[in-house]
Image (cartoon, rainbow, N blue to C red):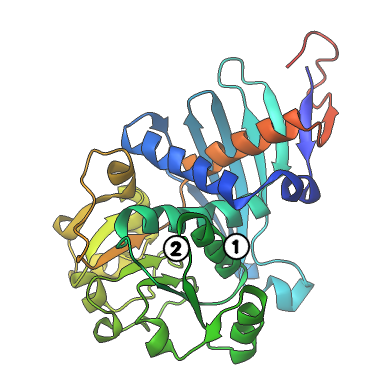
């Protein structure tokens, strides 16, 4: 029995946005039906280096695994390294054998973009024509690519407080650089920033729009004004994570938003437990990132790599030739 090792290049070779969106949609459905096991993510603060580590275990069907991922805000400036890096370990839940060890950095970006697209598929109006990307870093690229999977065509709008960053993203994907206010008026609004100060105002959001709030993933982070939340049907990915670190965490702590204001989870909608919102409803998806998304996509990447003989098999845990994986 051998473990498949997949480098970033290997993961890039086998991963497509279609693969990611399908895997994440399956994850949401399974989670919504209560078929997944996902303990709360564990944070290890590294305050002296402006960062943290996160351990994210999950089990879904025939796969179990854990992602070890960091967020170090000053990495690029200090060390020339990515802000986020990750490693994923995929196991067989029947016997605990490590099926694969793979780069989790691209996996994280892909599943996050795919989560936004799945939310848009189930919560946005069906005739959405414009999609905006507020915050044009790495995550905007996978959000854009994932929306190309679920929409026949759309106009892309780009905004970043760094105009050069917005322009580079726009040149790459064929978007139009616009003001923050104009970006917020899109049919589908995707925010992906690390902001701790709300900057999207409710009066900018058009009635019937859908918002993917992707940036808030730690206590104190908030991209949208509380009034924006109050005017939308708010769907979350997980109650424990959303209340602790999602877009709703600050308004909850101040008493300006309550648990009763949550319309449901995206998984419940994908699984058909809750109905889709009306076409004219203004909706919002509060995404914190689920470990069950990671394990579902890791399994899909593993199976695709195995079928294409991509990666390197090694005797990681010293079992030798006792059998085949």
Circles 1 and 2, Cβ within 8 Å, touching? The answer is yes
User: Is residue 233 or residue 83 the one in the foreground?
Assistant: 233
In the picture provided, is 99 more to the left or to the right than 61?
right
Sequence order check: which comes first, mark 1 or mark 2? 1
Q: Nearer the viewer, residue 6 or 12?
A: 12
Q: Position of residue 287 (x, y in %)?
A: 40, 58
Q: Residue at x 34, y 60 (%)?
A: 285
Q: Using residue 79 as the reference point, say whether residue 241 is left or right of it.
A: left
Residue at 46% from the left image edge and 53% from the top image edge: 115
User: Quadrant where the N terminus lies?
Assistant: top right
Which is nearer the eye, 276 or 59?
276
Q: Secondary structure at mark 2?
A: loop
**Residue 137 visible from this viewpoint:** yes
- Report the residue marked by disc 2: 218
**Considering the numbered disc 1 on the image, is that residue within a helix, a strand or a loop?**
strand
- Quarter of the image for residue 299 reads top right
Count the labels in the image.
Answer: 2
Q: Position of residue 189 (x, y in %)?
A: 39, 72
For the point 62% across and 47% down, which residue is it?
68
Q: Could you say where residue 8 lies in the image, as x and y percent from the top left?
A: 76, 50
Residue 160 vs 235, above or below: the answer is below
Q: Quadrant of the C terminus?
A: top right
Toward the top, the furthest residue is 322
Crowding at dot 2, Cα within 10 Å, few <14 / some 14-19 / many 20+, comes out as some
Location of residue 263 in the rendering, given as x and y in whole percent from the top left corner: 20, 55
Disc 1 to disc 2, how far (Cα)? 10 Å
Q: Residue furthest left?
A: 260
Q: Residues within 10 Å of mark 1 (few under 14, many from 20)?
A: some
Residue shown at 21% from the left, 55% from the top = 277
- In the picture, measured across the screen, residue 230 lies left or right of residue 174, that is left
The image's mark for residue 139 is: none
The label on residue 71 is: 1
């Amino acid at each position: 029995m051998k473990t498949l090792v997949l480098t970033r290049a290997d993961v890039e070779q086998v991963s497509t946005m279609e693969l990611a969106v399908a895997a994440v949609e399956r994850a949401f459905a399974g989670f919504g039906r209560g078929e997944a096991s996902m303990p709360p993510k564990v944070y290890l603060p590294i305050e002296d280096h402006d960062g943290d580590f996160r351990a994210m275990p999950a089990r879904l069907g025939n796969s179990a695994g854990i992602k070890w991922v960091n967020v170090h805000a000053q990495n690029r400036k200090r060390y020339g390294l990515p802000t986020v890096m990750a490693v994923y370990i995929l196991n067989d839940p029947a016997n605990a054998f490590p099926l694969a060890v793979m780069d989790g950095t691209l996996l994280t970006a892909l599943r996050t973009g795919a989560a936004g697209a799945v939310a848009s598929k189930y919560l946005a109006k069906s005739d959405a024509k414009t999609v905006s990307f507020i915050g044009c870093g790495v995550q905007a690229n996978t959000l854009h690519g994932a929306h190309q999977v679920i929409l026949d065509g759309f106009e892309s709008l780009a905004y970043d407080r760094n105009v050069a960053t917005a322009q580079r993203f726009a040149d790459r994907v064929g978007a139009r650089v616009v003001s923050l206010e104009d970006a917020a008026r899109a049919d589908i609004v995707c925010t992906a920033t690390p902001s701790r100060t709300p900057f999207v105002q409710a009066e900018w959001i058009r009635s019937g729009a859908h918002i993917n709030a992707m940036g808030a993933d730690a206590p104190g982070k908030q991209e949208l004004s509380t009034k924006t939340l109050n005017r939308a049907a708010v769907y979350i990915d997980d109650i424990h994570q959303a209340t602790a670190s999602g877009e709703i965490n600050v308004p909850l702590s101040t008493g300006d938003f309550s648990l009763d204001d949550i319309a449901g989870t995206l998984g419940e909608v994908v699984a058909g437990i809750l109905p889709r919102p009306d076409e004219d409803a203004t909706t919002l998806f509060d995404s914190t990132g689920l470990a069950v998304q990671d394990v579902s996509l890791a399994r899909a990447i593993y199976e695709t790599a195995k079928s294409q003989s991509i990666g390197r098999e090694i005797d990681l845990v010293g079992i030798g030739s006792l059998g085949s994986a």
